[in-house]
Structure formats: C-alpha cells, structure tokens
Amino acid sequence: MPVSVIVSFVVVFALALLAVSVGLKYFDARRKNQVVEMLQTASGEPVVSVSNLLKELESERPGGLKRIFSGMQFSRHAAEQIQQAGLNWSSSRLIASMGLMMIPGLGIGSLMPFLLNGPTTAIVLALVFGAAPYLMVRHKRSRRLATLEEQFPESLDFLARSMRAGHAFSISLEMLGEEMADPLGQEFRALFNEQNLGAPLETALRNFTMRVPLLDVRFFTSSVLLQKQTGGNLSEILSRLAYVIRERFRLKGQVKAASAHGRLTATILTLLPIGTMLALLLVAPGYLQGMAEDSDGKYLIGGAIVAQILGNFFIKKIINIKV
C-alpha cells in the first residue's frame, strides 16, 4: 500500500476528530450560555462580576512563571479544573508538572524509537507523559463531582427539613455545612461564609455554581433565586427537587446497566491488541521486529495506534448517554 494513501487516511481521520471535538465544544459552550441566561432571568438582574471574598487560587499580581501563564487561556481552565478537583494546587504548578513530565517522555522516545523514527516517537511520548498530570486532575475532578452529585439530594432534604422547623435559609446553610460530610459540606461552608462576609446571595450562589458545575446545582440556584424574587414555599420546592434528582439517579442506573455491554466491548477491543502484541513479544520476540524495522511497517504501526485511539473515542461517545 502506498505511503501517501496511509498518510492521507490518517490526516482525514485526524481532521474528522478535530471537527467533532470543535463541534462538541461549541454545543457545550452554547448550553452553558443558556444556563447563564436562565440564572439571569431567575434573578431579574443584569450580569454582575463574580466576586469571591474567600481565598483566591492565584494572587492578584502574579510574578515569574505565574505572570507568563496568567495570560494563557489554559491557565484559567487549569485553575478551574484544580479547584473543582479539590486540590490545593495552582495553575502554574500544574503546567510546570506537565512540562517536567515531558522530559522522560523525550528521553524514552529518543532511546526507543518504536514509531516512525526517533523524533516522532520522542514527541508522541512527550505529549503522553506531559498529559499525565492533567489527566490525573481530571480523574480526581470526575470522582469528586460524582461524590457531590450523590450527596446533593440529601443536602436538599436537610435544607427543606431545617426550613420547615422555622430556621432561616442562611442559618440552614450554616447548619448544613457543619453537618454534611465533605466534599459537599466544604462547598456549603464556603457558600455560607461568602454570604456571611457580605457578598450578595446571587453572587455567592453563582460562585457556588462555578465551583460545583453540576446540572442539579444549577437547578438549586435557579430555584432559590426565583423564590427570592417571586416568593413561595422554598422547602417544598427543595423537597420536590430532591425527588427529581433521585429519579434521575435511578434512570442513570438503568442506562448504565443497559450500556454495560458496550463498555465491556470497548474495554476488550482496546486491551486485546495490546495483549496480543505483548504475548507475541514474549513467545516470538523476532516476529514483530521485522515490521518495526521496515519503513512501511512503521507507518502501519502508527496508523494502527491512531485507529485504536479513534475507535475507543467513538465507542465511548456512543455509550456515553447523558440523563
């Protein structure tokens, strides 16, 4: 097979993957803008700048590396991911860790050029090693958000019971922050402290929504702001919201059980080629050596790796059903 055909195939798939990623980012940004408009409509006020009276992750006038990284768009994104993961890091520390992890990737790639050539292998491994700290933060963020989502219905029931007992909303928030286990208790304590230190309720709730980017939290914020403007029985609203969230959890469990076959298929299809390669290297070490030394074989190996990544990506997208 000509090398140009293989290169064209890889380029077309890469462009398709890039187009899909850009499209997903666009729709996600549009959905977030719609949620912001809903919050503004519920509050009945124009957009206000979010002010945080508690400790900031970054200083107001960073210096050195922080000054360089503060102008990068990734710096703000990294700071949000770190905060939502519950880590006591800074964006410059994460970026520096990613840069340091690239060094062993470059070294291993230069010594073991198992892809097309030495520079290509070094660049690929540097990117893989460099992405490891960011992927770790994303993993911790996902686990923490999952825990927050599980705790949230119980917290709404606590608020509803406290308000039925005659406590004010702010006092209920303080009691919830003290009684609820972390990490949700920590977030409610931050919400109460911001309001207690003088921040408007709208600003404190928006900060809470930014720290805990969950759909249920947005519903909670909209409900509280709407009740503040129009009145109503907030305890009843929170009780019904807790019931809806629990029903969503039940439906998500059913969807997860229905998509278990797809997740198992994705895992097997991802690990089977790797396991086969390792088994061949143990049983017949020289069997794959000829392909790795041949120029066309290197392109085939690179194309197989790219196809494997694309296949896993699309399978994950297909079985990732949002409820």
Image (cartoon, rainbow, N blue to C red):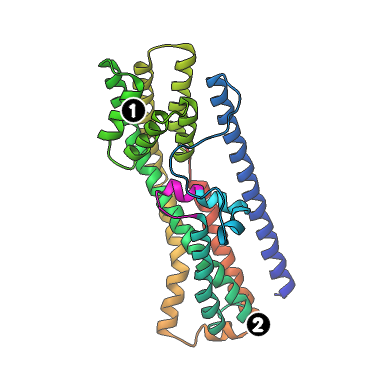
Q: Amino acid at mark 2?
A: Ser
Structural crowding at the residue carrying mark 2, measured as other residues with C-alpha within 10 Å and reported as few (<14), some (14–19) or many (≥20): some
Residue for badge 1: 173
Per the rendered image, the range of residues in magenta is 80-90
* Direction bottom: furthest residue: 286
Q: Are marks 2 and 1 in contact (CB under 8 Å)?
A: no
* Residue displayed at 35% across by 24% down: 170
Q: 165 and 71: which one is in front?
A: 71
* Residue displayed at 49% across by 14% down: 229
**Mark 1 secondary-structure assignment:** helix
Where on the picture, by quarter, is residue 124? bottom right
**Above/below status of 42 relative to 206:** above
Q: 145 and 81: which one is in front?
A: 81
Q: CA distance from mark 2 to mark 1?
A: 66 Å
* Residue displayed at 35% across by 21% down: 169
* Residue displayed at 28% across by 26% down: 158
Tag in front: 2 or 1: 1
- In the drawing, what numbered circle is on residue 295? 2
Residue 29 in sight from this viewpoint:
yes
Magenta-drawn stretch contains 86: yes
Residue 154 in sight from this viewpoint:
no
Residue 219 in the image: x percent, y percent?
A: 46, 27
Residue 234 in the image: x percent, y percent?
A: 38, 17
Residue 35 in the image: x percent, y percent?
A: 55, 30
Image quadrant in which the N terminus is located: bottom right
**Above/below status of 112 relative to 234:** below
